[in-house]
Image (cartoon, helix red, strand yellow):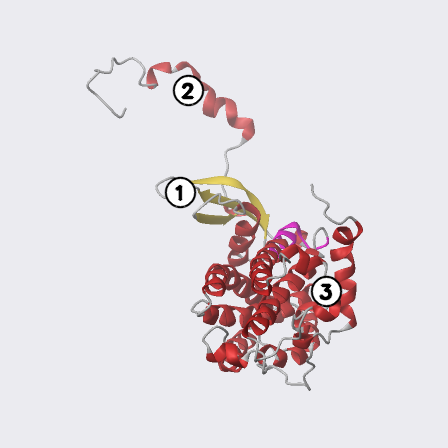
Amino acid sequence: MSHDWPLWEVFIRTKGGLSHKHVGSVHAPDGELAVRHARDVYTRRLEGVSLWVVRSSDIVASDPAQAGPLFAPAETKIYRHPTFYDIPDAVKHI
Amino acid sequence: MAAPSPSRPDAALFDYLLRLGDDSLILGQRLTEWCGHAPTLEVDLSLANIGLDLIGQATLFLGVAGEVEGRGRDADALAFHRDAHAFRNCLLVEQPNGDFARTIARQWLFSTWQLALLEGLSTSAERRIAEIAEKAVKEVRYHADLAADWVVRLGDGTEESRRRMIDGLDWHWRFVDELFDGDPIEQPLVEAGIAVDRAALRPGFDATVGAVLEAATLPAAARPRPIKGGRVGHHSEHLGHLLAPMQYLPRAYPGAVW
């Protein structure tokens, strides 16, 4: 039966203030039941306080074949990491 | 065990707790029969989750029943060491699963009714019942909503899903009236504010059921000649077949633990 149902990607907010994170996917005939299926499959052990589902086919992804040109150039730009500063002792919460 | 009678409040309360606990226990056991057999993995987990919620409720209700009875029987003793005639569940919950639509029909009718019952019991004068009901209401609201969602989708789905949904409901209508039957055992408990007046739940149930059937484009609820008897231990042959695998292990290996 499930091969007739579209696939939905599931995102869970683990607690208030945090972002929704991708946890997996479910099959469901529509969005409302996708939320129910996501609840039943992925939140059985208090994993979250909020759920998003989105049709997998609606996700636009980068092309794995283009991973080199897309991501490799950043490898040599270590100065983009803010690791060259001395943090004064008086500064907390950083 | 002495026969429960209205003149012995504890015996009546014990019987009432069995009715509450056995409904949840038997339907929970039925739902676990779907494990590994449901149409999809997602539905498998949905049904198992509902089953586990119900078995959790049964553990609590039967635990209190054992305390009230005062003969040293705990929830396990009541679940696994009573024979079919000593069970007090309604006939609806012991009905075989059939196909998915019939299982959903049973779940929807039961959960819609149980939600109203538990909402009433959450203000019961018997504190232990009120506490269990308050916890269970949240679970059952989800069960009722999920089942109603499926009734609408199957009823207003394909030609086949619609036919199966109608067949599933037709199997179960005759067991609905029993849910709303009070009797002399419950009457004093109702008057004491411990039990819910079952008959008073009917109008709300009919309204909810009617609205979902309409959304599902399904025919209105049927009222065939009702079949009753579960509350006094007159069960269908299906209950024994359910109890045999459920009770086998604790009876074959008394006191077994893991």
Indicate the secondary structure of the residue bearing disc 3: loop
Q: Nearer the viewer, residue B95 or B74?
A: B74
Residue B117 in sight: yes
Decide whether the magenta segment is chiefly helix, strand or loop: helix
Residue B200 is marked as none
Q: Nearer the viewer, residue B171 or B4?
A: B4
Percent position of residue A49, x then y: 43, 47
Marks 1 and 2 share the same chain: yes
Residue density around tag 2, few if under 14, some if 14–19, many if 20 or more, within 10 Å: few
Alpha carbon of mark 1 to alpha carbon of mark 3: how far?
38 Å
Alpha carbon of mark 1 to alpha carbon of mark 2: how far?
32 Å
Percent position of residue B111, x then y: 56, 68
Mark 1 or mark 2: name the one nearer the start of the chain.
1
Q: Nearer the viewer, residue B217 or B201?
A: B201
Q: Does residue B84 belong to the magenta stretch?
A: no
Indicate the secondary structure of the residue bearing disc 1: loop
Residue A74 is marked as 2
Alpha carbon of mark 2 to alpha carbon of mark 3: how far?
56 Å
User: Over which residues does the magenta segment extend?
Assistant: B37-47
Quadrant of the frame with the N terminus of chain B: bottom right
Q: Chain of mark 3?
A: B
